[in-house]
Image (tube, grey):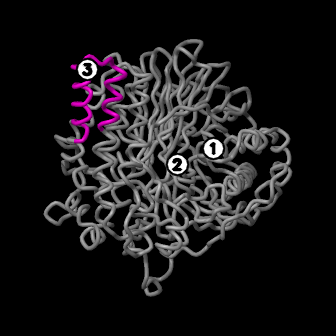
């Protein structure tokens, strides 16, 4: 069937199908949505529907994204929360050629020093759960900043959706129920405030059961009240939203400081007190900054700076641009091998160089054509098994972390007398029907012992041309104890910092940890044409790279690219506690085919079969500037993500 006679909406392609890609894409699981009014896509249908409802009532993409994001706090509490963080990248209809990054990543508290963690707490890694792993909450302030500067709706209108679901209830996801079941004993024995919140009557709420979060609803209602009081006093819209931001800091700061002072169980199996104070919360203000960008096949791709992992995707695009198209098809043995090897190189650079302190000149070198050529020459016919960062002119060789291949939760149970009681650091979503192993630490693992990271994502485009991609995360229900009076817990982003002063991502007061949150905006001729992103921790940019190659080079539609078989490498230190790696590791969906998987193994890749529909949580929205036609697509895996629009 040709693109011209498709009836499923998948005829929307930036380029025609590239014959260098082994075969036309398979029929998509869903149509690529097409329309001219507005489009939204996210990891939960209620967030998508809420965002679309805002568009239908005249709101902009920014009003809609904020409304959907606050709903995600309520309906996906195992994957994100108000105590976590977010990163967004957006472009406005007024300045379409100037993408901007919305920074909702809070820094380390003033008391989060390497000396305290090492010498006082006796740690060699930042724990994966508990208050010592918490950066200052950044997500809520970032959404309020976006709403103030780019939105049109009042805070009361935007928060009505989330308040409704928190106050009146929503049907509990099966994934949330399973997560609570996995950490129920931890809650009962060590985190009583979480037991009170998530185990009503000392039982695990069942899938589909209507659950509420009245404490969080009350927090949001206090923000609405602060806005209303400011408006009654004569403040304008912006000042009224700033009043709500101040109320957030006051409410959260006081509650957090009092609560984290009491020792509680952390991922290392011991009890520690946190270090966050009300002053830390009060000092944080979200911001907007310029993105890192590269050009690829005539498109401009915009990402965060090196305080996030976003430039790793940009490096990968620059390296891959120099290969023949046939080596850019992830569905072939040669293409999958090339992509995996390039990702190893860029993620090694992430470990060696990325951090908030990396300056603009150094980043420019890492993204340059010359450096890409140097790195491209390292891609051979067989799998590499070492960590191979490149060099920066005039800088000493990077100090690499101590590489751990032992995962404490994959050993036999008898060998785990000190197994961490609070699990590892990232939330997990196994594929539907996939065998899982629920260990005593409360972590859901795949049957082969590997973890599966996930979080949330939302994309929105409106009829005026405003477009945003955003990835909220952190503060998931299993990350640390629920804070009394707030109805949510703190995040764990500090686990991505090293307790090593020489590391570019070393723990330091006031420094942002190097986040894995990495949304993407694509522009053509100065106009935004696609916003995309994915949950998945270290896999986020890896899965997005596959989509970009398939859409921008292979000619796939967005839905075809999202559906296509995915893969990623684990051959670098993971960002989440306990920071392990698998030399030459390659995790692949079985749908790539036995011939491809055998070929990768023969090249030396340590292949882990993930099942047919296990990897990737991508969603996207699109806009054709020439016609004004909008599009949207969402992930079918897990039966949870949805796109909507007209």
Q: Position of residue 57 (x, y in %)?
A: 31, 18
Q: Which badge, 1 or 3, comes first in the chain's sequence?
A: 3
Query: Residue at left 18%, top 65%?
Result: 203
Residue linked to disc 2: 616
At label 3, counting other C-alpha atoms closer than 10 Å, the crowd grade (few under 14, some 14-19, many 20 or more) is: some
Residue linked to disc 3: 231
Give residue 546's mark: 1
Secondary structure at numbered mark 2: loop
Q: Image height check: is 20 above or below 51?
A: below
Mark closer to the observer (3, 2): 3
Q: Position of residue 140 (x, y in %)?
A: 38, 39
Q: Which badge, 1 or 2, comes first in the chain's sequence?
A: 1
- Front-most of 378 and 126? 126
Q: Position of residue 454 (x, y in %)?
A: 46, 52
Q: What span is in magenta?
A: 219-247
Q: Between marks 3 and 2, how big is the CA–CA gap?
A: 44 Å
Q: Residue furthest top?
A: 627
Secondary structure at numbered mark 1: helix
Assess whether mark 2 and mark 1 are in contact (beta carbons under 8 angstroms).
Answer: yes
Q: Position of residue 133 (x, y in %)?
A: 45, 60
């Amino acid at each position: 069937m040709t693109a011209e006679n498709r009836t499923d909406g998948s005829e929307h392609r930036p380029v025609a199908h590239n014959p260098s890609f082994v075969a036309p894409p398979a029929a998509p699981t869903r149509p690529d949505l097409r329309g001219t009014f507005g489009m939204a896509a996210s990891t939960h249908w209620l967030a998508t529907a809420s965002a679309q409802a805002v568009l239908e009532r005249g709101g902009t993409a920014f009003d809609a994204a904020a409304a959907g994001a606050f709903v995600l706090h309520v309906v996906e509490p195992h994957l994100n929360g108000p105590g976590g963080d977010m990163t967004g990248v957006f472009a406005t209809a007024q300045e379409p050629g100037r993408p901007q990054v919305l920074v909702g990543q809070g820094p380390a508290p003033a008391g989060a020093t390497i000396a305290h963690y090492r010498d006082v707490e006796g740690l060699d890694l930042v724990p994966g759960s508990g208050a010592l792993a918490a950066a200052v909450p950044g997500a809520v302030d970032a959404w309020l900043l976006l709403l103030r500067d780019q939105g049109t709706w009042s805070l009361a209108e935007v928060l009505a959706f989330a308040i409704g679901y928190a106050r009146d209830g929503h049907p509990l996801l099966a994934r949330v129920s399973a997560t609570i079941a996995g950490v129920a004993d931890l809650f009962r024995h060590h985190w009583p405030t979480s037991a009170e919140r998530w185990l009503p009557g000392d039982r695990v709420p069942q899938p589909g059961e209507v659950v509420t979060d009245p404490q969080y609803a009350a927090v949001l209602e206090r923000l609405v009240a602060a806005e209303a009081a400011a408006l009654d006093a004569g403040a304008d819209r912006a000042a009224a939203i700033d009043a709500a931001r101040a109320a957030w800091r006051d409410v959260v700061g006081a509650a957090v400081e009092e609560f984290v002072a009491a020792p509680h169980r952390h991922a290392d199996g011991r009890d520690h007190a946190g270090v966050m104070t009300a002053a830390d919360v009060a000092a944080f203000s979200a911001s907007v900054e310029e993105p890192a960008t590269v050009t690829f096949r005539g498109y401009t791709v915009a990402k965060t700076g090196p305080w996030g992992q976003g430039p790793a995707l940009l490096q990968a695009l620059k390296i891959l641009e120099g290969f023949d198209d046939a080596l850019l098809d992830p569905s072939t043995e040669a293409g999958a091998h090339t992509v995996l090897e390039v990702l190893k190189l860029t993620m090694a650079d992430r470990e060696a160089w990325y951090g908030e302190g990396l300056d603009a000149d150094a980043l420019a070198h890492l993204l340059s054509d010359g450096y890409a050529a140097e790195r491209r020459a390292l891609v051979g016919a067989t799998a590499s098994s070492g960590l191979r960062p490149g060099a920066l002119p005039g800088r000493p060789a990077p100090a690499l972390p101590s590489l751990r291949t032992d995962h404490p939760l994959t050993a036999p149970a008898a060998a785990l007398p000190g197994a961490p009681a609070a699990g590892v650091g990232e939330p997990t979503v196994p594929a539907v029907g996939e065998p899982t192993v629920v260990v005593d630490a409360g972590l859901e693992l795949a049957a082969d012992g590997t973890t599966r990271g996930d979080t949330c994502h939302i994309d929105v485009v409106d009829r005026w041309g405003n477009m945003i991609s955003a990835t909220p995360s952190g503060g998931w229900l299993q990350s640390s104890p629920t804070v009394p009076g707030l109805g949510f817990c703190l995040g764990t982003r500090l686990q991505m910092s090293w307790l090593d002063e020489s590391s570019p991502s070393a723990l330091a007061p006031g420094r942002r940890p190097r986040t894995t949150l990495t949304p993407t905006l694509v522009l053509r001729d100065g106009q935004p044409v696609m916003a995309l992103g994915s949950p998945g921790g270290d896999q986020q940019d890896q899965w997005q790279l596959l989509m970009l190659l398939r859409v921008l080079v292979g000619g796939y539609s967005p839905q075809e690219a999202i559906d296509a078989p995915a893969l990623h490498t684990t051959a670098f230190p993971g960002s989440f506690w306990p920071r392990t790696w698998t030399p030459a590791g390659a995790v692949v969906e079985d749908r790539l085919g036995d011939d491809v998987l055998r070929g990768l193994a023969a090249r030396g890749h340590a292949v882990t079969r993930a099942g047919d529909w296990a990897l990737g949580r991508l969603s996207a929205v699109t806009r054709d500037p020439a016609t004004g036609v909008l599009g949207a697509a969402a992930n079918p895996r897990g039966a949870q993500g949805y796109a909507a629009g007209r």
